Amino acid sequence: MALLAVRVGPLDLANPVMAASGTFGYGTELAPFMDPGRLGAIVGKSISLEPREGNPPPRTVETPAGLLNSIGLQNPGLERFLEEKLPALRAFGTRVVVNIVGERVEDYVSLAGRLGEAEGVDALELNLSCPNVDRGLLFGSDPALTEEVVRASVVATRLPVIVKLTPNVTDILPYARASERAGAAAVSVANTYVGMALDWRSRRSRLARPTGGLSGPAIKPLVLRLVWQCRQGCGLPVIGVGGIATAEDALEYLVAGASAVQVGTATFADPAACARVLEGMGRLLDEAGVRDVNELVGSLRAAPAGRSPN
Amino acid sequence: MTLVGAPGVPPADLPGRVLALDPLGSEAFRLRLHVPGLGGEPAPGVFFQVLCREEEARDPLVRRPFSVADARAVRDGVEVDLIFAVVGRGTAWLASRRTGDTVRLLGPLGRPFAPGPGGLRRVVVAGGLGVAPFPLLVRTLRGRQASPDPVTVLLGARTARRVLCAREFEAAGARVRVATDDGTAGTRGQVTALLEEELDPGLGPAEVHACGPEPMLRRVVDLCAEAGVACQVSLERVMACGFGACYGCVVRARPASGGPPRHDRSCLGGPVYDAARLAGVEW
């Protein structure tokens, strides 16, 4: 049986399969269908200081092999998260990563500070790149602001800080490097791509807001390349997240340079998707004679001259 | 006494085998599935998330929600009926299934209709495909007691060929009244005009269950609020997951415990809502 334990900076995980923020509720929603405790980590839905009602519906629309969403960060706020959601998350018995979002640097500092004092939180993931609220992309699309908010968060907490980067920039590397300079433990690559879907007859967006964030298999090749780029150009461990639906997808991300992966949108169609990716990963590694999953991380070779990889 | 509320059937991701796919009216289908793994008959008003593609495919990506139209416990599982029309890629795939094919269902999901105590006139209002959850509800309302409450089903449709399940409701012991936009069946006009007649206080205390297009449901909610009649409506939302993870399918509703309207995940808190939680709300 292949060894599956991985380290993501200071964070040791029983296996490299994590549940992505915003696709796994706070864990209890999935419990009827699978055991969330089997996963390497659970990343909860974004938490803000105050409760947020989110955007009006329709909030999701399917596109070819993809899903556009504009949820708008609906969440119960920090206090109710600590009271109502965290105890159940902890009880699953695996790593708990709390994804946090703010409108000002001070919001991230307050959230990071409070969550650092809470028992049962293993790491924070900073959402600097929500495309679905006004100014949501602010921190994630200016490297200086990214560095400022990450540094302030790192200083405010004892917890490892993971930075979730947006793909909606010309070059992602300055953001990965800014995160590294600011003391982040890892980067999650990447959040959703801003996109649109509309109905030309009614001249209306299919979402209540004009734009949404695209996820799902449609974006996998794009994000795979971002992961590879960050691995090449930045010293931080990379968590790959974008369109993973199968164990094959996850292993491709590891070869591109991810130390761990997050399964997101696939959970919506199959609530046991994370567990299936994990099971399939062990089986495929055994079949391939790979004894330790870490052997794959960043193992991409140059394509032989004159041969197509297909 | 609670009429409906079969003991909760735990939700699961299950294969169903296609028994039949029958045309229903001019536009719709009734899909009959045998689901061996299902733990019991689902309650009226709950739904399944149906995977409308081969499992290995990645498109269409997410499942489609369908109310349980009817369900019958059989020796080795449950037979489940779904009523649908082809409105996109998912339903087109579903409409191309053949007897013996496998379709994956996740459920049962959501909160069912919860009719109040016996002794009321039951009025069911269905607009177009909104008839979907009612064969099971009507059969349950008529079947659970030695002397069942009278049930009146009001069916609204654009035209006669889109009036669905009328004979089935009659066979279950319901009185059926029809309204069509073009007058080709029943009265000409809106089904809510029939509801106004049925809400006449002189007819005795009533309870209303409704499903259909949103403008119809808004009128039903308003009429019942004015008449002081208990009402439950089944709402439709674009839904990605169906089990509370995506936060996509929200409805603005007053919390059951009171207070201002909040975004409520209709896959968990609905799809059936007490009309009192929706009256006067831009849901």
Image (cartoon, helix red, strand yellow):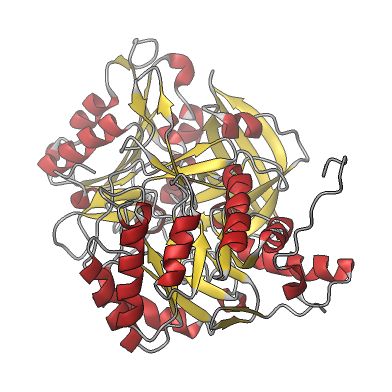
Of residues A75 and B181, which is closer to you in this image? A75
Residue B50, how many percent across, how many down?
Answer: 59, 46
Residue A28, how many percent across, how many down?
Answer: 46, 72
Answer above or below: position of B232 versus A260: above
Q: Is residue B1 visible?
A: yes
Q: Quadrant of the N terminus of chain A?
A: bottom right
Image quadrant where residue A238 sits:
bottom right
Image quadrant where residue B59 sits:
top right
Which residue is painted at 25% across and 49% down in the image? B252
Identify the residue at the far left of this view: B226
Answer above or below: position of B181 versus B72: above
Residue B183, how many percent across, how many down?
Answer: 34, 11
Answer above or below: position of B248 versus B194: below
Of residues B249 and B41, which is closer to you in this image? B249
Label tally: 0
As drawn, is B73 to the left or to the right of B198?
A: right
As drawn, is B53 to the left or to the right of B213?
A: right
Q: Is residue B203 visible?
A: no
Q: Quadrant of the C terminus of chain A?
A: top right
Which residue is painted at 28% across and 82% down in the image? A114
Residue A46, how many percent across, how many down?
Answer: 36, 64
As drawn, is B182 to the left or to the right of B6?
A: left
